[in-house]
Structure formats: structure tokens, C-alpha cells
Image (tube, helix red, strand yellow):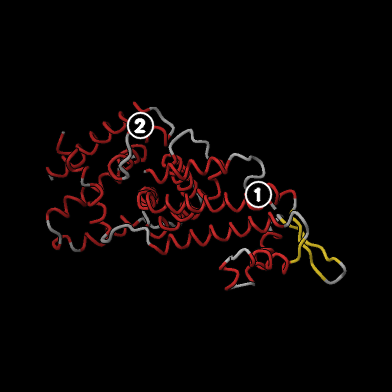
Amino acid sequence: MEHYLEVEMIQQDATAVVEQLMRDNGQQILTMVYHYVKNRQVAEDLTQEVFMKCFEKLHTFKGKSSLKTWLCRIAINHTKDYLRSWYAKNILVDDFAVRAQQSSQSVDDHVLLMECDRELVYAVNQLDLKYSEVIHLFYFTELTSREIAQLLKINENTVKTRLRKAKKLLEKQLGDDQND
Amino acid sequence: MTNIEQRLQRLKPATETVLGEPLLLTEQHIQNVRAFMYKSELKQSILALLKQPKSSSDVTQLLHTKNETLIRQNEGIIINLLHELELAGFVQSNWQDEEQKKYTVTKKGLQQLVGEQQREPLFQLRSLWQEVRSQ
């Protein structure tokens, strides 16, 4: 009976930990997942699965990184697994593609700032994944380059190089657009 | 150069503008995860109880006295969970005295029990909890 109580206590603590993680980082994880899948519905589903997975794996957490980095890594792995699935490759709908079609019909309706924002978002999304990924993790998920390095299991200098290169590419892309 | 930096600072609101409405983790999403956790919690409790053979009503009774609210609302949940656990190969059942079906945890089921392999997690979780709260 003793062991039974122990299991009970562990479980309750795990629930509390995950619940708190969800309240503190849920939003961030959702936007991070969204960047990879670019589909709201799928991002919401995957995010919930990430926290379920986190709950199941919490007892394997070794404390080698921060809990947040560990959580982000589960999210990225889970999302990338999903993107490799048949469903993602064949059926997944990209919100931005849908929006792009809609917006081309009503460009006049939008104010300049919105056009500016739109341009930026599309430019970022058109980058190679290895560049858009770091841009997104840095500016959107607001992680440090050190955290990103841990997360993607690459060197911190590589992260910085990719950020620099990505910004160069964006500059070129957005600069060209202005000349049109 | 600083121009692109400034624009990137706006990446978050910009994305939301393009999407039309902000990405939001709703209470419903949190609720779904909570329900999942509650269910796995119950499964864990059931597995821990089934080290000695017990019938579904024994299990229900034991969890009931432990003041599990969800069980009060829906006693059938235990039978469903036992069925799920049996399908997954975590418990096995046999008929005793030809009238009562008794369930026992399997080797595979024991492996599912958190804290069975290592005894540290309890301690670890406490420090994790502190880490989370201090953020």
C-alpha cells in the first residue's frame, strides 16, 4: 500500500508541474509549433499532444537542461515527426498559402503598415527552414541564441551565423520588393 | 541593417496581423490535457492496485474511498480503463470461482508504473516543481 501512495503522490506532482508549464509556456509552444506546421488547427492539436507527452516523460527528465528547453525540444521533435508523416506531406493546408490567395483579391483594403507586416511574414516564411527556424525561435519565441543552440543541438556560433545570414537574405528580399 | 532588426522585432504582431486573429492556447486546450492527465493518473493508480488480483468492483470501491471525484460521477470509467489496459497488455484477467473476473497487472504493465524502476522521481519532481514556480 505504501508504494501505491507513492505513485499517487508522484502523479499529482507531475500533473501540477505540467499544468504550471502549460500556463507559463503554452502560448509560446503553440506559436513555436505553428511556425513549423503553419496551420492553426494542427498547431493546437500538436501543442496539446506535446504537453501530454511531457506529462508522460516528466519522470525521465534528468535536469541536464532547463525544464523549458526540455519542453521546447519535445515540441520541436514531436512537430518534426508530424511533418514527416504521410498526412502532413499530402493533406496539410498552409494557412499562409490560403491567406496569400485571399489577400491578392483585396490588396486595396489594407493599410500600409499591414502590407509591411505581410511582406515581412512572407519573406520569413520563404526562407529555408534552417534560417526561418532560428529567426522564429529568436524573434517570435523569444529564446536566446544559447537556448536555441541547446534546443537544435547545434553550436551557438552556428545559431549566430544563421541569424546573420537570415537577416542578410531578408534584407535582400525586402529591399528588392521596395524597388519594384 | 538596423532597419531589418527593427522590422523583425515586429515579427510577432505582424504574424498575428496576417493570420487575422491571434494564436491562442485556450482554456479548452488546457482542459483537454488535464483530462488526459487525469485519465493516466487513474490508470497508474489502477496498475498499482492490481499487484494483487482484484475485480473491477474492488478497484472501483478502493478508488471511490480515496475520494476520486470523477469516479463518483461515472463508475463505468473504471471498467473502460481496465478494458483499455487489458487491450494494451498491461493487465490480464481471469475468471475466479467461475463468477468473478479478476484483473492482475502484467510484467509489461509494471514497467508502465512510474517510480517502479527508479525511486528518485518523487524527489526530482519536488525540485522541478520549485523550478517551475520560481519562474
Residue depicted at x 23% and y 33%: A168
Cα separation, mark 2 vs mark 1, equals: 35 Å
Residue B80: quarter of image:
bottom right
Q: Element type at marker 1?
A: loop
Q: Nearer the viewer, residue B110 or B14?
A: B110
Whether B77 is drawn above or below A8: the answer is below
Q: Is residue B81 above or below residue B9?
A: below
Tell me which chain the residue with mark 2 is part of.
A
Q: Nearer the viewer, mark 2 or mark 1?
A: 1
Residue A179 % position (x, y): 12, 42
Residue B124, how many percent across, how many down? 53, 40
Residue B83 visible to an observer of this rendering: no
Q: Position of residue B101 (x, y in %)?
A: 79, 67
**Would residue B66 be seen by someone viewing this image from the given angle?**
yes
Q: Amino acid at mark 2?
A: Arg
**Closer to the camera, B94 or B132?**
B132
Residue under numbered circle 1: B113
Q: What residue sits 27% from the left and 35% below the top? A: A166
Q: Count all numbered tags in the image, as a single digit.
A: 2
Disc 2, SS: helix
Crowdedness of circle 2 by 10 Å Cα count: few (<14), some, many (20+)? some
Q: Quadrant of residue A140?
A: top left
B30 or B57: nearer the viewer: B57
The image's mark for residue A146 is 2
